[in-house]
Amino acid sequence: MIPLDYYLILSAFMFCVGVLGVVVRRNAIVVFMSIELMLNSVNLSLIAFSSFLGDPTGQMLVFFVMTVAAAEAAVGLAIIIALFRNKQTVNIDEINILKW
Amino acid sequence: MSFEQVVFCFLAILAAFSAVMMILQRNPVNSALYLILNFFCLGGLYLTLNAQFIAMVQVLVYAGAIMVLFLFVIMLLNLGDDRRLREHLGLRMYLGIGFSVALALELLFIFLFRSSNSAVQQSPNAVEMGTVEYVGKVLFTKFLFPFEVTSLLLLAAIVGAVILAKKKIAE
């Protein structure tokens, strides 16, 4: 039997890698994929707690997180396409039209 | 080591490795492929936690649908070469690495210095909890309202994606 801590440590590690990707990478699509990685690491925590506590609420939350992630991916990639059409780049250092 | 532990170790190491490789790759296509590998490993880990339905949804929706969308956009934008996108080691990069390591240490300290020992056994009713039958029953009774609201969210996402990605028609 695998202890709960192992799942939580893996989840924490993946979350930190996702944070690092968001902060360090400048390619908007890779930043976006790092956000997906962070969502997935939290999903792993939720499933682990759900399984160890015997409560289905965690699994339901993961189900809804996946739905929101799918919607987010569709809209986010549409935004990236629209940005690329206007600026010919996906470097988030050069996309600063909302800054003043 | 039991069979279950061997499977867990293999999947966990592969998941951690592919997560690290995902942010190290310069080519976004390689990043996306490593992320798909990571999602498959997570699906396997969900199986070791007796969440069969979520494991299947993970492979179908995440590794299937969402990542195909990512790869499609990467190839549509022709981002094969990352050379034009200079990612220099600036002050911000070192700050980012510092903050990430700080976050990792904080999370590690929580595990090292927690007060009570957490549950070490999987709950006995976890075995039947992950089946499609059980998940469906809970989803359509206790979580019916969030489930219905989800449909509105998806509708809004479809309309929003089409409007945003639509080519501007010259008037």
Image: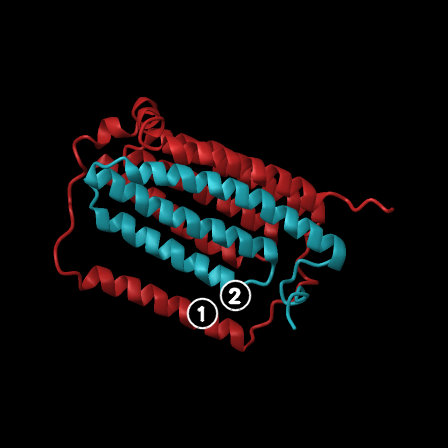
Q: Identify which residue is drawn at 73% across, 43% down.
A: B166
Which mark is drawn over residue A24?
A: 2
Q: Measured from the top left, where is residue A8 in percent x and y?
A: 28, 51
Q: Is residue B170 visible?
A: yes
Q: Nearer the viewer, residue A70 or B45?
A: A70
Q: Are marks 2 and 1 in contact (CB under 8 Å)?
A: yes
Extreme residue in the top direction: B133
The residue that disc 1 covers is B97
Q: CA distance from mark 2 to mark 1?
A: 7 Å
Q: Nearer the viewer, residue B28 or B131?
A: B131
Please state which amino acid type lies under the numbered disc 1.
Ile
The colour of chain B is: red
Residue B80 drawn above or below residue B88: above
Q: Identify which residue is drawn at 62% across, 63% down.
A: A92
Q: Identify which residue is drawn at 22% across, 32% down.
A: B126
Q: Chain of mark 1?
A: B
Please state which amino acid type lies under the numbered disc 2.
Val
Q: Secondary structure at mark 1?
A: helix
Q: Identify which residue is drawn at 82% across, 44% down.
A: B169
Q: Secondary structure at mark 2?
A: helix
Q: Chain of mark 2?
A: A
